[in-house]
Structures are given as C-alpha cells and as structure tokens.
Image: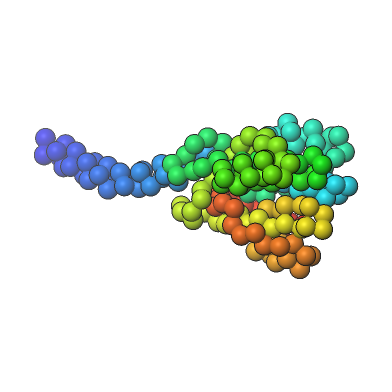
C-alpha cells in the first residue's frame, strides 16, 4: 500500500512539473506544413504555396521552376499565429505576402493586387524558437522575394533587391537555407 501511495505521489509530481511545458507547446503549434518556393524566369515572379497540387500544376505548365521548401508554417490556427495573406498582381506578375490586413487592403485597393486568400499561419513575433521570414523587393522587375536564409538575403541585396524587413516568423523546423535567388 505504501509503495502504491509513493508511486501516485511521484506520478502527480511528474504531471504537475510537465503542465507548464504542455501549455508552452500549445502556444508553439504542433503541425508544420511546407511552404514551397517557385520561380518564373519569364515573368521574374517568386511564388509561394503550401498546396502540393498547385505546385505540381505550376511546374507542369512550364511556368515555374520548383526551388524547394522555403520555410515551414502552420496549416491551421495554432496558439499565437496570424494569417499570412497571399496577393497577386497579374499585370505586374508579382505575388505579395503580408500578415498586415491594412497593408493587404492597401495593395488590393491602390496597387492592383487581388487577394487570393491565406497562404498559411505564422507568428508575428519571434517566439518558440522561430526564425525571421524576410521580405525583399526588386523594383526593376517587380518581384517580391521571401527567405529565412541570411545568405540568400545578403545575395538578394547584392543583386539590387531592397530589404523590406521581417514579414513574419516561422518555425525553425522545415527551414531550408542556401537556395539560389
């Protein structure tokens, strides 16, 4: 009887000790989905999607070259995540992504972009070991480029892109570095 009581006390201590960790993990999210990065060299457009069928279709139609997985994100609401909105301007052949609804509305109202929905869910602050997702812009070809890689970011800046800062924070799992711009 004494050993059963000791076992129950030990189990309760373990459960009580792990509860704060479980809460932290809930805020950090569980399921990560890949964000595929594609590039169209004819229209100078970087295109990002979490949809594998959309990726295959864009590649099969000889429009885009698959560059790989740019980052990871969440397919559904997780703790402290917000939508990463996807917009497209067909006249400029440019995809644009933002977490800011005011910026989204400005681009759709004033710049000819069409809101295509939510790409994925991301953090807007650096929590849970997340890494920055940088946004860069090449005005000469109207191309927005997004990367988690410091090396890619530096290379894009050397190629004439303008740094537009951090658009979001994404889970470190699933991040791919060192891809060509």
Percent x, y of residue 45: 79, 48
Q: Quadrant of residue 138?
A: bottom right
Is 15 on the left or on the right of 84, as rendered?
left
Q: In which quadrant of the rendered image does the C terminus lie?
A: bottom right
Percent x, y of residue 54: 74, 33
Is 170 on the left or on the right of 79, as rendered?
right
Whether residue 7 is visible, yes or no, is no
What colour scheme has been applied to the protein in the rendered image?
rainbow
- Report how many numbered discs are placed on residues in the image: 0
Whether residue 88 is visible, yes or no, is yes
Image height of 142 relative to 4, above or below: below
Going 67% across and 49% down the picture, which residue do you hit?
Answer: 70
The residue closer to the viewer here, 97 or 111, is 111
Going 80% across and 45% down the picture, which residue do you hit?
Answer: 92
Percent x, y of residue 171: 54, 50
Residue reaching furthest front? 110
Q: Quadrant of residue 161?
A: bottom right
Image height of 57 relative to 65, above or below: above
Q: In which quadrant of the rendered image does the N terminus lie?
A: top left
The residue closer to the viewer here, 30 or 106, is 106
Image height of 157 relative to 5, above or below: below
Q: Quadrant of residue 160?
A: bottom right
Percent x, y of residue 97: 65, 46
Going 63% across and 34% down the picture, which residue do you hit?
Answer: 117
Going 27% across and 42% down the picture, which residue do you hit?
Answer: 15
């Amino acid at each position: 009887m004494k050993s059963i009581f000791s076992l129950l006390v030990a189990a309760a201590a373990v459960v009580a000790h792990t509860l704060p960790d479980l809460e932290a993990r809930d805020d950090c999210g569980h399921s990560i989905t890949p964000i595929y990065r594609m590039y169209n060299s004819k229209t100078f457009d970087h295109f990002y999607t979490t949809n594998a069928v959309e990726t295959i279709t864009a590649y099969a139609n000889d429009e885009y070259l698959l560059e790989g997985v740019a980052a990871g994100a969440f397919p559904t609401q997780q703790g402290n995540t917000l939508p990463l909105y996807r917009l497209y301007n067909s006249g400029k052949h440019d995809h644009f992504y933002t977490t800011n609804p005011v910026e989204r509305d400005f681009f759709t109202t004033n710049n000819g972009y069409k809101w295509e929905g939510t790409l994925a869910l991301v953090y807007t602050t650096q929590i849970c070991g997340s890494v920055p997702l940088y946004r860069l812009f090449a005005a000469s070809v109207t191309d927005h480029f997004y990367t988690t890689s410091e090396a890619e970011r530096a290379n894009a800046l050397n190629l004439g892109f303008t740094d537009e800062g951090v658009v979001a924070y994404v889970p470190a799992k699933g991040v791919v570095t060192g891809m060509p711009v």
